[in-house]
């Protein structure tokens, strides 16, 4: 039920993001989802890719600082209030969302939300109990 996410620390300067995507593209790695957060000095690029181990290896070989984080991918109805209902369940249980990002494959159907929680196991159990569809890593890598 967990998804492997790559975190890449980038200097906040022109061309670094382009370099990461070029390296992954040259290695035949497909990016399934991404998020970029920045400060004045550096950024954190979070990626879900179809070939985690290969992506980590090629990025490290090119000198990037790369980390691994386990996240959860859930399906949320792509409609007003779809995300709010899931967040309400988490809030009532006192589970903190450290960060999240989303993508929609087909508008009007379902969105996929990537979550990082302060208590991953408890969040997964709670979401399952609430009937929320949680993707297996293999499912997300193939989306």
Image (cartoon, grey):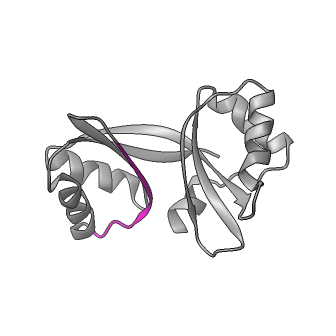
Foreground residue among 67 and 102 = 102
Residue 126 in view of the camera: no
Image point (21%, 61%), residue name: 18
Considering the whole magenta stretch, tell me its main secondary structure: strand
Image point (63%, 32%), residue name: 120
Image quadrant assignment for residue 111? bottom right
Residue 139 in view of the camera: yes
Q: Tell whether 34 sits left or right of 107.
A: left
Instruction: Count the marks.
Output: 0
Residue 87: x percent and y percent?
A: 73, 40
Q: Tell whether 3 sits left or right of 58.
A: right
Residue 115: x percent and y percent?
A: 58, 43
Identity of the residue furthest to the top in this view = 94
Residue 63: x percent and y percent?
A: 14, 44
Residue 17 magenta-drawn? no
Image point (85%, 41%), residue name: 129
Range covered by the magenta-colored residues: 28-37
Foreground residue among 142 and 111 = 111
Image quadrant assignment for residue 130? top right
Residue 106: x percent and y percent?
A: 63, 76
Please state, as top left, top right, bottom left or bottom right, where the C terminus lies in the image: bottom right
Image quadrant assignment for residue 136? bottom right
Q: Tell whether 82 sits left or right of 98.
A: right
Q: Is residue 17 above or below residue 66?
A: below
Image point (75%, 31%), residue name: 91
Q: Is residue 141 above or below residue 107?
A: above
Residue 30 magenta-drawn? yes
């Amino acid at each position: 039920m967990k998804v492997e996410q790559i975190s890449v620390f980038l200097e906040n300067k022109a061309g670094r993001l382009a370099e990461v995507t070029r390296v992954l593209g040259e290695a035949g790695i497909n990016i399934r989802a991404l998020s970029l957060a920045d400060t004045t000095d550096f950024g954190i690029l979070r990626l879900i890719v179809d070939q985690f181990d290969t992506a980590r290896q090629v990025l490290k070989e090119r000198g990037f600082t790369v980390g691994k984080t386990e996240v959860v991918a859930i399906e949320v109805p792509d409609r007003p209030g779809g995300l709010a209902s899931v967040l309400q369940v988490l809030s009532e249980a006192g589970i903190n969302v450290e960060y999240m990002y989303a993508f929609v494959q087909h508008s009007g159907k379902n969105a996929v939300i990537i979550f990082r929680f302060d208590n991953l196991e408890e969040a997964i159990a709670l979401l399952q109990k609430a009937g929320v569809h949680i993707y297996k890593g293999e499912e997300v890598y193939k989306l």
